[in-house]
Image (spheres, rainbow, N blue to C red):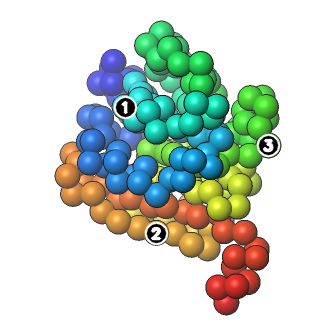
Amino acid sequence: MFLRGFLKHPVMVGSIVPSSQKLMNRMLAPVDWANCRLFVEYGPGVGNFCRPILERMAPDATFVAIDTNDDFVRYLRRTIRDPRFHAVHGSAADVRQIVADHGHSHADYVLSGLPFSTLPAGVGEAIATATAQVIRPGGAFLVYQFSPKVHDFLSPHFERIDHAMEWWNVPPAQLYWAWADDVAELASAA
């Protein structure tokens, strides 16, 4: 299914192989699961991250996975039977409306493996803008990529961006945690 999705939509699927367990653990490590009510994922594909996220989430939390590939959405709906999980066919650029449609005013964390450097012109900027607007103060945009170009999409919207490399992945991945610091936090840091 993953390979078929890559071949069908190579510009929208970031890799030909799923992410490694080490990448997933490292990417999700900074999440404050006790205070996470809504977790959003862009481009979940076949759900490689979905089960580890659901294992960590509180029983009353919600997980919304957004994908433009209807084959992936149907697959996720068929294979993940958890009442907290909602697979949505749509664009990450519409995240604010999708979050509202699920009864929330904001997301605590948003995870993305979308290949920002190969998205059609304007799409990456629209996704970064919408994401910055939907994440609550103290939350974060978690991004894993194979190109450092994603930093150009994040930096206009997030003042604090942590970065690391995960070498135990094929190919090695760039990891970014873009934090939605609130104004009081920024003022006290200055």
Q: Residue at x 57, y 24 (%)?
A: 85
Q: Give the structural element (helix, strand or loop) at label 3.
A: loop
Q: Nearer the viewer, residue 77 or 2?
A: 77
Q: Residue furthest bottom?
A: 190
Identify the residue position indicated by label 1 in the image: 48
User: Which three-letter amino acid code belongs to the residue tagged 2?
Assistant: Asp
Q: Nearer the viewer, residue 173 or 162?
A: 162
Query: Could you tell me residue 148's position as x and y percent?
Result: 39, 63
Query: Could you tell me residue 3's position as x and y percent?
Result: 29, 24
User: In the rendered image, which quarter is residue 125 located in?
Assistant: bottom right
| Label disc, if present, on residue 165 of the rendered structure | none
Q: Give the structural element (helix, strand or loop) at label 1.
A: loop
- Number of numbered discs on residues: 3
Q: Give the structural element (helix, strand or loop) at label 2.
A: strand
User: Which three-letter amino acid code belongs to the residue tagged 3?
Assistant: Ser
Looking at the image, tell me whether mark 3 or mark 1 is earlier in sequence order: 1
Q: Is residue 179 above or below residue 187?
A: above
Identify the residue position indicated by label 2 in the image: 162
| Location of the N terminus (image quadrant) | top left
Identify the residue position indicated by label 3 in the image: 105
- Neighbours of disc 2 within 10 Å: few (<14), some (14-19), many (20+): few
Instruction: Report how far apart the C-alphas of labels 2 and 3 lie in the structure.
Output: 25 Å
Query: Could you tell me residue 67's position as x and y percent?
Result: 54, 29
Looking at the image, tell me whether mark 2 or mark 3 is earlier in sequence order: 3
Q: Nearer the viewer, residue 170 or 10?
A: 170
User: In the rendered image, which quarter is residue 8 located in?
Assistant: top left
Looking at the image, tell me whether mark 2 or mark 1 is earlier in sequence order: 1
User: Which three-letter amino acid code belongs to the residue tagged 1?
Assistant: Asn
Q: Residue at x 69, y 79 (%)?
A: 186
Q: Residue at x 77, y 37 (%)?
A: 104
